[in-house]
Image (cartoon, rainbow, N blue to C red):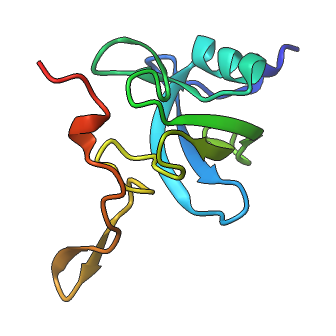
Amino acid sequence: MNWLDQVRWDAQGLVPVIAQEQGSNDVLMFAWMDRQALQTTAELGRAVYYSRSRAKLWFKGEESGHVQKVHEIRLDCDNDVVLLKVTQVGHVPGVACHTGRHSCFFSVLKNGTWETVEPVLKDPRSMYPQP
């Protein structure tokens, strides 16, 4: 059996993916992959996701320059969530979020409000082409 056939894809042919930083174990981001994205990620050793909003493959860092080098691909016990162990590489090392932060999980619930607990490391306007 092909290893891709062991993944439990949802009705849209997608699987949720968590990107975790190698070493620190920080959770950097959450995204989706289709079969082609997961296969391409395994072949290239670079994170490739499926953009639901654009309905196409999204090579992490194709616009921002902040690429994820993949060290390990794991599948959870139910075969329906993928975990990538990655190193975030780019112009400002460690930036994974489109907001210019290290992690997309930068808000913490404290006393009934969301508080930002991670600084912006790079101005997001400098990472993406402006219309």
Query: Splitting the image into 4 quarters, where does residue 46 fall?
Result: top right
User: What residue occupies the far bottom of the structure in this picture?
Assistant: 111
The answer to whether residue 26 is above or below residue 55 is below
Q: Is residue 21 left or right of residue 126?
A: right
- List x then y, in percent, for residue 53: 27, 21
Residue 26 is situated, as x and y percent measured from the top left of the image, at 57, 63
Residue 59 as seen in the image, left or right of residue 125: right
Which residue is rendered at x = 67% and y = 45% of the image? Answer: 86
Tell me the quarter of the image containing the C terminus.
Answer: top left
Q: Return the x and y of residue 58 as percentages of the image width and height.
A: 45, 19
Quarter of the image where the N terminus is located: top right
**Residue extending furthest toward the left:** 131
User: Is 111 situated above or below 22?
Assistant: below
Q: How many marks?
A: 0
**Residue drawn at the location 84% of the way across and 14% of the way down:** 2
In the displayed orientation, state which residue is furthest to the right: 1
For residue 76, above or below residue 49: below
- Which residue corresponds to the image point at 71% horizontal and 36% vertical from the top-left? 70
Residue ID at (55%, 46%): 18
Image position, residue 49 (x, y; %): 51, 25
